[in-house]
Amino acid sequence: MKDIEIVQQAKESFNRIIDNKTYANIIKDDNHLLEIMDLIEESNYRRILDIGTGTGYLAFPLAERFPKSTVCGIDIADAIIQKNNEIVKEKGITNLSFEVFDGLNYLFEDESGTVWVKHIDVGNTVYMKA
């Protein structure tokens, strides 16, 4: 199976499951979110990249808490990315965007000043790379 076929299967799978309340309740952890925000607040990042953003569980609050930073959420699920961008437009959020990322083509040329965050569901681990 070719990489593009594997990506397409993953995209279809995530598009089916990611935008529902059951999934949102599984990943929601307000204490974990506060830990991430506290870790980021200790530094002065101008860009925050939320990997596997899904519903924007991290990205929306990060954009609100850090208005001087640019926040970008990336995910393979194009349907949820479209929905998130509609919410951004509706609410007039100027420092937040969402992009489809398939893992095959890198989106960003310059990573300087960027912190990468990822909410890992198992064990509530935070992965951050500055």
Image (cartoon, rainbow, N blue to C red):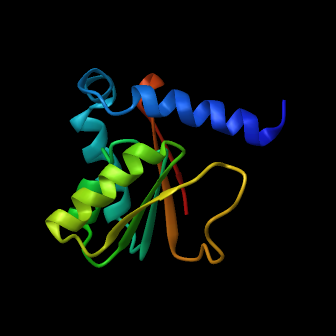
Measuring 72% from the left and 33% from the top, which residue is drawn there? Answer: 6
- Residues 58 and 100: in front is 100
In the rendered image, residue 10, in percent from the top left (x then y), is placed at 61, 32
Left or right, residue 68 beside residue 5: left
Measuring 25% from the left and 25% from the top, which residue is drawn there? Answer: 25
- Above or below — where is 61 with respect to 17? below
In the rendered image, residue 74, in percent from the top left (x then y), is placed at 49, 54
In the rendered image, residue 4, in percent from the top left (x then y), is placed at 75, 42
Quadrant location, the C terminus: bottom right
- Above or below — where is 75 with respect to 24? below
In the rendered image, residue 32, in percent from the top left (x then y), is placed at 31, 38
- Above or below — where is 32 with respect to 93? above
- Residues 25 and 130: in front is 25
- Above or below — where is 77 with respect to 69? above
Q: Quadrant of residue 92?
A: bottom left
Measuring 68% from the left and 62% from the top, which residue is drawn there? Answer: 106
Q: Residue furthest right?
A: 1
- Residues 79 and 28: in front is 79
Q: Quadrant of residue 121?
A: top left
Measuring 37% from the left and 60% from the top, which residue is drawn there? Answer: 40
